[in-house]
Image (cartoon, coloured by chain):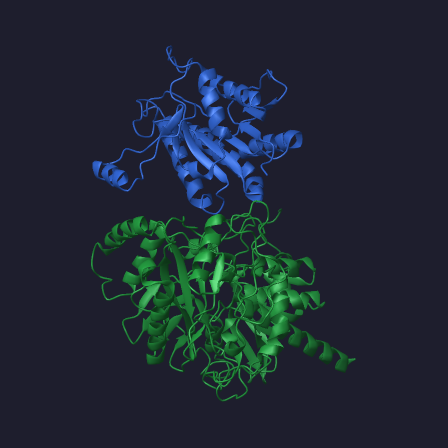
Chain colours: A green, B blue
Amino acid sequence: MTSGRTDPSQLEETNPVAIAANRHWDVIVIGAGLGGGMAGRRLAENGLSVLFVEKGPVGYPSEGHFIKDEPDDYLSRQMLGFWPAKVEASVDGGRPIRFFAPLGSGVGGTSVFYAAALERPERHDLENVGGLIHPTGGWPVGFDAFLPYLTQAADMLSVRGEADPLSDLPGPSLAAPALTQAEAKMFADLRGSGLHPYRAHEAIRRVADCEECLGRKCPRNCKMDGRSAGVQPALQTGNAHLLSDCSVEELIETSGSIAHLRVRSGGAEFMLSAKAVILAAGALHSPRLLLASKGRHAEGCGNSSGWVGRGLMFHLNELVAFWPSRGSSSPGATRCLSFRDFYTVQGYRLGLVQSMGVRADAGLTAAYLKSVLAQSAFHRVPGLGKFATATAMIAAKLLGNATVLVGLMEDLPYFGNRVGLHPEEPDSPKIEYRLSEELKHRRALFRRTIRRKLGRSRTLLLGLRPALNYGHPSGTLRFGSDPATSVLDADCKAHDLDNLFVADASFMPTSMGVNPSLVIAANALRVADIVAARLQAAAKKVQ
Amino acid sequence: MMPAPIAVISEAGEPLGRALAVALARHGVAVAAISREGFEPEMDLIMSVRADVGAPQDAARAFTEIRKRFGAPTILINAAEVYPHRDILDETPDSFMATLRTNLGGAFNCCHEVLPAMVASGTGRIINVVTFADIQPAPFSAGYSVSKGSLRILTRSLVADLGERFPGIVINDWIPGSHAPRRGIADGIAPAVVAEWGARLALLQDPMISGLVFLRDRELQPAASWKRKLKDRVLGKRRALIHLV
């Protein structure tokens, strides 16, 4: 450089955000996680110009770290691809507690850290089936309309596993890897108890040196997630572009459309624009962006129903240690099996049970106990952390031989359960949640059923209080037919806006009895097809 | 699949550096040996590179030559050092920083050169040759003691930043111990013997050992309190020392 000054026009050309701001995109996808990644891929493969705007970093393909509570400073967490701030939750009207939820922020979102459990929902998760009435009267899109997308998503994510023997649906097209002897023994064990285990559905390609990256980033492009099955193939089409480390601050609405996105990158602000906007920042963040976009409406953008951020659901995790029958060895950390024998009991919606895939070692148990304690009334007692560690070490000795199973119990939507803006910290989701009586009742039934069917002498229920799975938030921008009680229509387009769509777990009116990932991916593909059809129809009209 | 190993030793002017190059080459490793003066390599697998790694541009040039000849290095042994004996009353700001520039800066510069390829492949090996000078500085060696001590902190920082994200990049401190002939110590261990330990350590690619400190031919475990020792014994956590021979 010869002069001390930089030519501003040159500066603009090298800044990717400034370049993106000079273009009117077909579609901007907010959030490059599982939903955003799959939607963006489908759109880019259809020849549309797609811009992913991602708050977190790209990261390195060979990274293999676990998602953790440490380090706890904002910038370090940001660089590691973790959601940088704590969430603040008040449960049952109690004192607000602050903790790091297992949420990612970066290319692939939370899915790069997930355990890749991609289980299909049941028909009754979406609609009335016989005497099993759906709590909302049914999703506006039925099971049969979802089915082809569930199959496409499973194929794109290389899902492998076995058909559930209790269902008439076919299994994934790829077969599960061979069982170890101990795993096969556990299958036989459970069948002996009259249960119907099947090979869990997992999105792992099982390449030669697969490390089964559950809870951590996969360095081999073997685990299929929002990054490997979404954003990367989208970018490879040449039609998609990515702005990382760039956060969307506000959606700017003019006459029923999102005209601009105000984004922040490297301390500067820019305006982006697109024909259609797909919001996929995750169920804790997508509604907060709408609530923070107050330009036209004080109650937030797209919020004429008052349901933005409400209807928040989590799954309830029921952890149970299960000991192998006498004389057989434990399969240890295995993710191999699921069963749906308790999916509904006595007409109540419970959920799937699966092996956890995490070894019940002292560190994990201590972390679990500490999180339980941090969220309890004892959080101020000094030395409790050490107590938890010591307890966990003893527990690890006892549990060493056990396999940890987890029952995922469905949560149901309530207007009062919600996520909103934190008055002081813009990146901290503020959660208000009440455990309903019916939830407690179903939980008691779930626990009783698990213990009775698995055998009281061979099981130990690990949780005391109901454990909300903060990694499975959903429902905060529910889709429905009635604009008075839902934020989105059947196409996952905002009732109030003609170009704003949603492709993350926010859309789900009920949380289902299975892990949400497959349905998030399937719905994202469905929404992408709808957006593509609309843009192509509009283009024809112009011609 | 591990790529064929390619090692860089940043100080081949000293007897230990030269011996390390030979020891690694005997294990079939292609070795680029950097020294300020250059030397005549004793084996075909050894490449002599002249550079002052304390100078970032000189280091960059050296690694460009190395990559051209062998490809991207998979092993880096940071051994470049100067050891001026100087009364702290005689140290000037320049003389003090010059020692840090070679002993600490040289190591960082070499890491900076090798890390991009190591991160891309997800595997690599970095060994920093250190001493106990940080714990008990010898008199009249402030620059040396501070620089070698800070090199140990660099090792821990590398582990803090890379250890969890890239477990395949294995990083250690190694204290070779007294070897003859060095700094007038007549009765040390022969460099060839010490170098064989170093070569074995460099060829250990187990993520479990990353961050451990090695002294001569074995792991150096931090001193533990009796409480910790008891706890480890009760919990069955006691672990045998790792030996290189």
Which one is nearer the viewer's eye here, A158 or B212?
Answer: A158
Q: Residue at x 38, y 32 (%)?
A: B213
Q: Position of residue A336 (x, y in %)?
A: 49, 56
Q: Position of residue A115 (x, y in %)?
A: 49, 58
Where A419 sits versus A77, above or below? below
Picture quadrant where residue B147 is located: top left
Q: Residue at x 41, y 79 (%)?
A: A346
The reply, left or right, for residue A349 in relation to residue A11 is left
Q: Quadrant of the C terminus of chain A?
A: bottom right
Picture quadrant where residue B37 is located: top right
Q: Position of residue A241 (x, y in %)?
A: 64, 61
Instruction: Say how many tags the image has.
Output: 0
Where B210 sits versus A5, above or below? above
Q: Position of residue A459 (x, y in %)?
A: 34, 60
Q: Residue at x 48, y 65 (%)?
A: A196
Which one is nearer the viewer's eye here, B129 or A331?
Answer: A331
Which one is nearer the viewer's eye here, A115 or A100?
Answer: A115
Q: Is residue B58 visible?
A: yes
Q: Residue furthest top?
A: B186
Q: Is residue A274 visible?
A: no
